[in-house]
Amino acid sequence: MDEKNQVEPAIGVAQGAGAFSLEAEGAPVARSEPVSTWTPDGEKPAESSTKGGAPDEEAVIEAIATVYDPEIPVNIYELGLIYAIDLHDDGTVKVEMTLTAPNCPSAQELPLQVKEAVEKIGTVTSATVEIVWEPPWDMSRMSEDARLALNMF
């Protein structure tokens, strides 16, 4: 096989300005319309929503809530690091998240932990985690429980 035609899988491939994906470079990416999209403002149904097959939003949130920032004793969901969750009929899930800072020491491990936690759900066929930097994270995104746990009022 010709060396220049080989594609080495690379986890954590930067994609454009301010985006980061945990998909292998050169891997085929299946695209499907989301059934619903979760945002910090609440769930918004997709315009072309169809029946069944999509993973349960609550199960995805519960899975994400098992991931903790090793420096902060609060899960990343309560910290407000999850910006969007897209659920698709084919069982794929796309998560958009951020980090508390661009130089976060957990930048490599947190997205991978989110991907692995979501993929453990029985109805999930695959998960994609994308790091986004806009809008920047700030403490106002933390839940009340997170603020209490960290003594930040």
Image: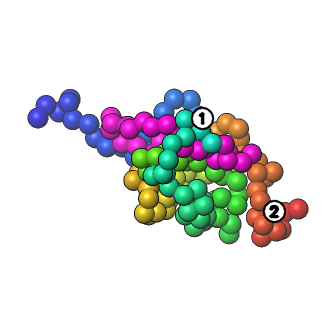
Q: Is residue 28 left or right of residue 57?
A: left
In the rendered view, tell whether residue 97 sits above or below residue 113: above
* Residue 55 - label: none
Q: Is residue 131 visible?
A: no
- Name which residue lies at 58% across and 48% down: 85
Q: Tell me if mark 1 has few (under 14), some (14-19) or many (20+) residues whose alpha carbon lies within 10 angstroms of its own.
A: few
Residue 70 x/y as whole percent: 60, 65
Decide whether residue 28 is among the magenta residues: yes
Which residue is depicted at the point 59% across and 64% down?
Answer: 62
Image x and y of residue 118, in percent: 49, 58
Query: How crowded is the residue under tag 2: few (<14 C-alpha within 10 Å), some, or many (20+)?
Result: some
Figure check: 54 above or below 9: below
Of helix, strand and loop, which one carries label 2? Answer: helix
Does residue 133 appear left or right of residue 15 in this picture?
Answer: right
Q: Which residue is at a point 20% across and 30% down the rendered structure image? A: 5
What is the quadrant of residue 3 in the picture? top left
Q: As shown in the figure, which amino acid type bears the numbered disc 1?
A: Glu
Task: State which region is magenta.
Answer: 20-44
Which numbered disc, 2 or 1, marks the residue that appears first in the sequence? 1
Residue 137 x/y as whole percent: 72, 46
Residue that numbered label 1 is attached to:
47
Regarding residue 2, the answer to whether it shows in the image is yes
Q: Is residue 152 above or below residue 85?
A: below
Measure how far apart labels 2 and 1 are at the Cα level: 32 Å
